[in-house]
Amino acid sequence: MDLHFTQHESLYYHRHFILPEVGMEGQRRLKHAKVLYVGAGGLGSSALLYLAASGIGTLGIIDNDKIDISNLHRQILYSYNEIGHKKATASQTRLKSLNPFVNIIAYDEKLTDKNAIELIAQYDIIADGSDNFATRFVVNDASFHLKKPHVYTSISQFHGQCSVFTAENGPCFRCLFEEPPPENLIPNCADGGVLGVLPGIMGSIQAAEVIKLVLSIGNSLAGRLLLFNALEMQFRELGIEKNPECMLCKYHQPFDSLPHHNFEYCHSEKNHVDEISVEELYDSQLKNVELMLLDVRESFEYQICNLGGKLVPLRLLSNSIPELNKEQYIVVYCKNGYRSHQARDILKAHGFSRVYSLKGGIIEWINKINPTMMKY
């Protein structure tokens, strides 16, 4: 890569040049750097814009998702007329229009244990903006084995967190999360919602940490977990201790043998127990099988679309137990199947033996059974 600057580049990066901590030498480091960003969603929309604008020489983006209208309130990398387009290629086009001096590589695929080592080996720093623990473990484990620092960031509703993990010094992501948290403990954006500006704030912090790593300036968040509460507008910080029994930091367990690489958040094996598909439900209805549909979404969701079931929001379910018949077959559904899993488990804990969760929720019903229903 040519590490000299053209006149246009010099004008573009002038405000960096005059920063003593950056200067022309620091900008050359940025130009020489190769950063892989995992997930071109809400966090990536902010982080990628600033990483590209800062002059990161090679910026890789891996994401196999398409742009949905529900993304746009927070994923400002995209426009309304790009709905249905691939995020990887759409973000590549947008970033090149922002800074034509950087090399943007788009990977229209999902990062898994099968391709992580090969991809991550090509980059200097990894930034993780993914939305599930399976991917986060893969990013951590591959980065550790390849001795690549990675910047972890996540969001939920009004809260965000960020840290930096480096293989040389530790701790790693597995020291922070030895096991994935219980299913449905942390709702995803589709079910729990998210404040639109939150990923912008946390993605900007993530980009700052990446740039600091490239420039070797300031104090990184290595060994520290930064927590942000948007409702209270408060930041606080927790120390991350190195786990003395960490399978990576201490025992250096081989990448291929590490657990949870194939763990699907909110879709673990136990979720398939007492689960019914939309096709099975539809067939049961055609055969007039007696069953009760229990909708555990919120009332505003019910008004958008419903299957005619009894509405009991998940947060009110425990108090509504006496209203339900334990002898009746019950099919619980929500939007995507996450809350219905939790509702099913609550009912089973109260002695309901004939309760099933609708796999994929009402969205799966719309996709496969009744596409005329309004989707949200």
Image (tube, grey):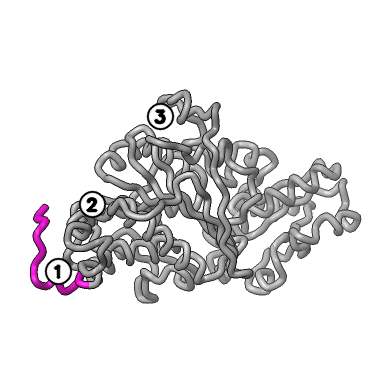
Look at the numbered discs 1 and 2 and tell me whether their residues touch, using CB distance below 8 Å: no
**Label 2 residue SS:** loop
Q: Nearer the viewer, mark 3 or mark 2?
A: 2
Q: Which mark is residue 255?
A: 3
Whole-percent x and y of residue 122? 24, 42
Specify whether 24 is left or right of 339: left
CA–CA distance in space, label 3 to label 2: 25 Å
The residue shown at (67%, 38%) is 273
**Label 1 residue SS:** helix
Whole-percent x and y of residue 206? 41, 58
Query: Is residue 8 covered in magenta?
Result: yes
The magenta span reads 1-14
**Label 3 residue SS:** helix
Q: Is residue 196 visible?
A: yes
Specify whether 264 is left or right of 207: right
Q: Residue furthest front?
A: 20
Which residue is labeled 2 in the image? 33
Q: Earlier in the sequence, mark 1 or mark 2?
A: 1
Which residue is labeled 1 in the image? 9
Q: Is residue 283 visible?
A: no
